[in-house]
Amino acid sequence: MRVLVIGAGKFGVRVIKQLRKNPKLEIIVADPHETPEAVAQGLIPKVDIRAHVTTLNFDEVVQKVRPDFVVLARTLQDWEKTDTPMGTQYVVGMERELTKSDVPVLPISEDVL
Amino acid sequence: MQGPYPKKKPLKTVIGTFELFGQEIVELSPSFFKFFGRLPKLVQRSIKLTLPFVALLLMTILPLPVDQQIQYALAIFVCISMLWTFGALPLPVTALLVPVLLTFYGIFHTTEALVPFADPVVYLLMGGLILAEAFRKHGVDRRLAYSIVSKFGGEINKILFSFMLVAAVLSMWISNTATVALLIPVVLGLASKAGEEKGRLSVLFLLGIGIGSAIGGMATVTGSAPNAVASSLLATRLAEDGMTWTFVDWMKIGLPTSMALLVIAWFLLLKVFPVKIKSLDISSVSKELKEMGRLSAGEMKTLGIFLPTVALWIVGANIGEMLGFPASFMSATIVALGAVVILFATRTLDWQDARTISWDIFLIIGAGLALGEGLQVSGAAGWMAEQLISVTHGFHILVIMLIIAGVSVTLSNFMSNTATAAILAPVLIGMSSVLGVDPKLLVLVCGLCVSLSFMTPIGTPPFTLIFSTGIVSRRDIAIGGMRVTIPAILIVVLMVYIFVKFGLV
């Protein structure tokens, strides 16, 4: 089973660690940074998809990866956009739009882990 | 950062970096900014914080050939303007400095200096923002957006217009930034279906919603904070002549101007950012609308409060008069406050929701009004007006209005729109008295033109947000903004001139 994890920051690290407990899962990680937290910690050797995934390129990424489901592992703090005015509203709106995809998308809240 | 549009000509004059409001910008700037941009951040901040107070001190002690009260008010004006421009302190903190300085220099007593912070227009805007929060919380804004877009069909020009219209309509009542934050994911989702053209289409759509929101915000007093500042100062000035200036009066000029600008901006954006693709499948929008189902209880409560509020903003004074209510009971501000109470009483909102509102804007508006009154009372506004008139002596009023529009747009592209209106409006009121012209001619041009700040990513928060997506480059914003701004200035000036001259407002 292929899982696309969007976000490899501090929150993504926790999500990847949890998913790795199931060896049957093939984890593909997307993040805009070259050495996000997951790479810096040596959890993954590199980011598989280096892109800032938004509604603009989500379908493209999904088509390329063909995951069985997608995990949104970005906290608000992982988004640089939250520094901008109403950035939080923007991020929340973006996550909401992404969950409408035909592929199952699981937005993980920090409370879950 | 490079957008999807290839550079036709290199911008040779782009040579420096500078920081305003915490945003590093690269603009058409002289070598001074290049030098300044290379200084350590701490040194930059120290300079930006020190210079305004050095100017304050110098202007206080230097023997200027003006009355002492005028000199002190000018010193405060220069200091606050510099602080607001440089952004060395947060804008609301600078706002708090206004009453401190006005009382220190003896221009106002404490109460006089603080009264503008409780001006009716401050509460009107507060009511508008809380109503907007109900819109956001219950998804009325999303439903409205999807409804309008789905009605227009899938041709690119129609989609663009529908997005701009949605942005404009929402911005008339809710914050421009909130509107853009809501629409960005939607427009990008739709643009993603454009294949190779998705980059170009994203730029077109993003600029469309940014410009649409700015233009829509011009239509009502609650649409954006600079309107509130200009409207309040104008109302105070007109009251001296026994005239009134109401919420509806602003709409009489704001709404038609806004709609005219929307059409022009739409046309120009299609010309400036052409796309090869002619249509898009918008079935996802219709599907989303269908999935929303019928109006939820929250949406119904929000609309049930919002629609009568808007109706009362427009015809409340007439109804109040018919029913024999006290004259100010049905004023726009009291209606807004009543609506807020009902929102909470019906549990449409709880106080936690209200915490998300940008409360800092009320301090900035209050400070703007206090500064304006300080300039008027001290005579500094009149003195500055006389200096300006000596420069523009013999010019036709239309030329003066064009100059005011140009100055307003230029300043607001680099500093807060509200602060720009707060700085310019009092001077323009003084100028209108000296020139013997209707103050509406000058103040409305300024009040409306400060919203045309879409040539830089720091012009307004919505453009900062659009720029932060990483899809639109500074060049796209500069080119798109400039092409729309120049005709927009002409339209605003002509509309204001015609409306005021023919007594339509």
Image (tube, rainbow, N blue to C red):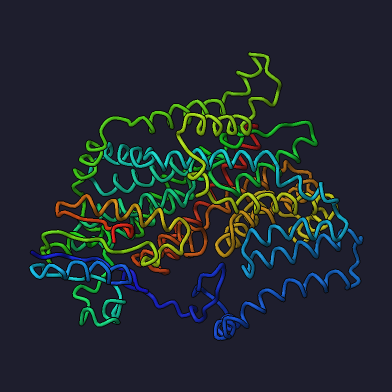
Q: Is residue B4 left or right of residue B334?
A: left
Height in image: B239 above or below B266? above
Whether residue B393 is visible to the viewer of this picture, yes or no, is no
x, y percentage for residue B491? 53, 47
Residue lying farthest top? Answer: B323
Whether residue B262 is visible to the viewer of this picture, yes or no, is yes
Quarter of the figure with residue A71? bottom left
x, y percentage for residue B440? 68, 42
Q: Nearer the viewer, residue B230 or B97?
A: B97
Height in image: B149 above or below B23? above
Image quarter hosting the N terminus of chain A: bottom left
| Residue drawn where x is 76% and y is 35% of the image | B239
| Residue drawn where x is 18% and y is 67% of the image | A19
x, y percentage for residue B445? 62, 48
x, y percentage for residue B295? 32, 30
| Residue drawn where x is 47% and y is 42% of the image | B133
Image quarter hosting the C terminus of chain A: bottom left
| Residue drawn where x is 23% and y is 52% of the image | A99
Q: Is residue B178 left or right of residue B368?
A: left
Q: Nearer the viewer, residue B328 or B130?
A: B130
Q: Nearer the viewer, residue A67 or B48?
A: A67
